[in-house]
Image (spheres, rainbow, N blue to C red):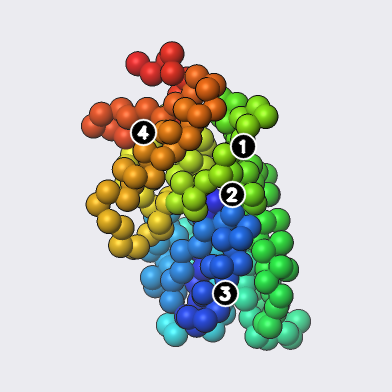
Amino acid sequence: MHRIALIEDHDRLVSLVQRGMAAAGIAVDAFPGVEAAWHAVRAAPYAAMIVDRGLPDGDGIELVRRLRAAGHRTPCLLLTARDALRDRVDGLEAGADDYLVKPFEMAELVARVRALMRRPATVRTLEVEYLGVRVVPDAGCMVCGEDTISLAPAELQILICLLQAQGRTVRRATLESAGWGVGTAVTPNAVDVALHRLRRKLAAFDANVGLVNIRGHGFAVRALDATA
């Protein structure tokens, strides 16, 4: 999915990165330290990680080492205030895929993250398509034929999750995490509202593609003549 993990303890930088990534169609879950991120990243299929080296409970390099040792290959970009060659080499040898020295331009961070997300080993083409419906994260919309419909941020992330499932059923909790992230307080009807809006928007394409509720199991995007 188009959601990344940011491991950073400075609130202002977290806010700046979240806004910059959102403008590129990428959602960000933020974690303030090594231990919080360790549990979350192992449990969720993040497209990439941005890891600060200087964290309250350790060096971000140690998080990368632990994840690589456990077999997790999520692409990782290290943020560091250290510009020495040895520090950069240490990060890459620990299993990081890229690094960026502070201070940095947001456009460069976005470009580097998008490059990591495109790597074949991780999927992860930035546009997702199924049954002729295509999500374009940069534009915040979905496209079918000549028609384009705008999507709210949560709708965008939920639809990416559904299209990536390629017709398979996706559980409600998974869609909630896709739309609002891990640990975010969500009102009880937020998922229902987002799914209702997505259902109406898909129907507007008049393309025989719909959002189906598989009772007791979850939801799927399917051809409407193949919903059984």
108 or 88: nearer the eye?
Answer: 108
Choose mark 3 or mark 2, whichever is in front: 2
Q: What residue is rendered at 32% in x and 34% in y?
A: 218
Q: Residues within 10 Å of mark 2 (few under 14, many from 20)?
A: many
Amino acid carrying mark 2 in the image: Gly
Determine the CA span between mark 2 and mark 1. 10 Å
Amino acid carrying mark 4 in the image: Phe
Image-quadrant location for residue 198: top left
Q: Is residue 63 visible?
A: no
Eyeballing the image, is 222 above or below 140? above
Name the N-terminal-most of marks 2 and 1.
2
Q: Which residue is disc 3 drawn over?
A: 16
User: Residue 117 appears at what percent x and percent y?
Assistant: 64, 53
Amino acid carrying mark 3 in the image: Leu
Name the N-terminal-most of marks 3 and 2.
3
Q: Residues within 10 Å of mark 4 (few under 14, many from 20)?
A: many
Choose mark 2 or mark 1, whichever is in front: 1
Determine the CA span between mark 4 and mark 2. 22 Å
Q: Are marks 4 and 2 in contact (CB under 8 Å)?
A: no
Q: What residue is rendered at 50% in x and 19% in y?
A: 208
Determine the CA span between mark 4 and mark 3. 33 Å
Name the N-terminal-most of marks 4 and 3.
3
Determine the CA span between mark 3 and mark 2. 19 Å
Image-quadrant location for residue 195: top left
Q: Which residue is disc 1 drawn over?
A: 148
Q: Residues within 10 Å of mark 3 (few under 14, many from 20)?
A: few
Report helix, strand or loop for mark 3.
Answer: helix
Report helix, strand or loop for mark 1.
Answer: strand
Eyeballing the image, is 173 above or below 94? above
Q: Which residue is disc 2 drawn over?
A: 140
Q: Which residue is disc 4 drawn over?
A: 219
Name the N-terminal-most of marks 4 and 2.
2
